[in-house]
């Protein structure tokens, strides 16, 4: 006798969709910002993702980060650590959005202070992204045995997490005056931030079981 597949609960589907939405925003954000600026304002890659705040893509940049923040706050995991990390990530993401990076020319002392807050929020946000991938997403419920797909997803989480940490380290290296002088024209910070954000997005797409879905 054939058994009919048991339909998933709507709330479970919505929860997975929420995670998938976070991932889509993360993967798409660098491309949307760069392509939107190219089409609407003119050629040229900004020095960093945050610099798109000073282009026609400002609203997309701010709106995407606020959406990511709200989504992260809405996600729940196995224990209080998951919820706490989500709330922190929400604060950091909205902080990055609302406290813009320092403008490159003619910055006032107030703008420089706000820019320092921006850098602090951005660094903490990336570290929280890495924590999600390396510590929270790799967990398995105590009463369950990891499936083959879950073990595959864990590999993706770890690759994404370590990629984010590597990008953070390289961004710090690029910030050194000598390195910036040598590679500044290649906009390395933009590309490193883009890789880190895409890794974050892939990690959340995987968490939403877009890939390696349990059978």
Image (cartoon, grey):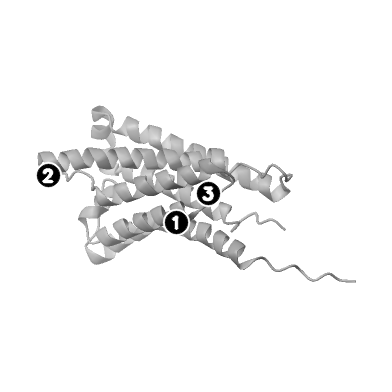
Q: Tell me if I can see residue 141 in this picture.
A: yes
Closer to the camera: disc 1 or disc 3? 1
What's the residue at 35%, 54% (across, down)? Answer: 65
In the rendering, which numbered label is found on residue 105? 2
Q: Where is residue 4 in the image (x, y as percent from the top left)?
A: 79, 71
- Give yes or no for contact between labels 1 and 3 (Cβ–Cβ under 8 Å): no
Q: How crowded is mark 3: few (under 14 residues within 10 Å), some or many (20 or more)?
A: many
Q: How many marks overall? A: 3
Query: Label 2's element?
Result: loop
User: Observer-nearest residue: 195 or 146?
Assistant: 146
What is the C-alpha distance between the residues marked 2 and 3?
Answer: 36 Å
Determine crowd level at label 1: few under 14, some 14-19, many 20+ residues with C-alpha closer than 10 A. Answer: some
Q: Which of marks 1 and 3 is nearer the N terminus?
A: 1
Pointer 2 or 3: first along the chain: 2
The numbered mark, 2 or 1, whose residue comes first in the sequence reads 1
Q: Mark 3 points at which residue?
A: 203
């Amino acid at each position: 006798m054939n058994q009919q597949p048991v339909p998933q609960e709507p709330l479970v589907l919505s929860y997975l969709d929420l995670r998938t939405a976070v991932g889509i925003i993360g993967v798409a954000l660098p491309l949307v910002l760069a392509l939107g600026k190219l089409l609407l304002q003119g050629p040229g890659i900004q020095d960093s993702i945050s610099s798109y705040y000073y282009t026609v893509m400002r609203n997309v940049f701010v709106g995407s980060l606020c959406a990511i923040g709200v989504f992260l706050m809405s996600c729940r995991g196995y224990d209080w650590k998951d919820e706490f990390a989500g709330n922190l990530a929400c604060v950091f993401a909205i902080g990055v959005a609302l406290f813009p990076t320092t403008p490159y020319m003619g910055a006032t002392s107030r703008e420089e202070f706000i820019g320092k807050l921006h850098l602090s929020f951005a660094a903490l946000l990336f570290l929280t992204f890495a924590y999600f991938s390396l510590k929270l997403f790799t967990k398995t419920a105590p009463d369950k045995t990891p499936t083959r797909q879950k073990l595959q997803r864990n590999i993706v989480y770890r690759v994404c997490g370590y990629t984010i940490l590597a990008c953070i380290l390289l961004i710090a290296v690029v910030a050194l005056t000598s390195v910036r002088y040598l590679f500044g024209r290649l906009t390395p910070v933009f590309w490193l931030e883009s890789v880190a954000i895409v890794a974050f997005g892939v990690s959340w797409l995987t968490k939403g079981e877009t890939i390696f879905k349990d059978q």
